[in-house]
Amino acid sequence: MATDHVLATDGSRSRELYCLAEGSKAPMTDEAKKPVWPWSKPLPRFASEAEEVAFWHAHEFESPPEEAWQEVEGPAGGVSRASALRTSGSAGLGAALGAIVGALVWGPAGAAIAAAVGATAASYLLLRRRADRAEAA
């Protein structure tokens, strides 16, 4: 593309570029307008993955009205901030110990690899311990 040409959208419509020729007001679109699938109409059953992909690419989808939305709660027993901090602290401690051992045994490259392994192992062991306690309770 030549450096003296700039293609930009006006932000009012997606995927439309206005022609740079003088006096042109018509937008250039890279694809024809797709039919809108109503939000209340059930989706068809697809015989194959290719048929499903073709369907999703062939339609635009209407958003449901505000009153149709519902709030859904996340999973019970989500991760608390304290729990996340304990996990990250354990990963940091595992990384530090791994780096020290790796540096002593294998040098700088070993320190980096051992730090990653140490952080992963510490996080995994802490999460396993937490899961075992949750099952016992």
Image (cartoon, helix red, strand yellow):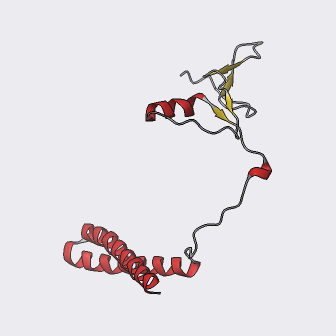
Q: Could you say where residue 117 lies in the image, as x and y percent from the top left?
A: 31, 71
Q: Name the image quarter holding residue 70.
A: bottom right
Classify 133 as above or below 107: below
Classify 115 as above or below 59: below
Classify 70 as above or below 24: below
Q: Does 29 sit left or right of 104 as displayed?
A: right
Q: Could you say where residue 41 lies in the image, as x and y percent from the top left?
A: 67, 37
Classify 133 as above or below 1: below
The one nearer the camera, 103 or 67, is: 67
Q: Name the image quarter holding residue 35.
A: top right
What residue sits 65% from the left and 29% below the top?
15
What residue sits 57% from the left and 69% below the top?
75
Q: Could you say where residue 105 lies in the image, as x and y percent from the top left?
A: 20, 77
The one nearer the camera, 82 or 76, is: 76
Q: Identify the residue at the far left of this view.
A: 105
Q: Could you say where residue 74 lies in the image, as x and y percent from the top left?
A: 61, 67
Q: Does 68 sit left or right of 34 as displayed?
A: right
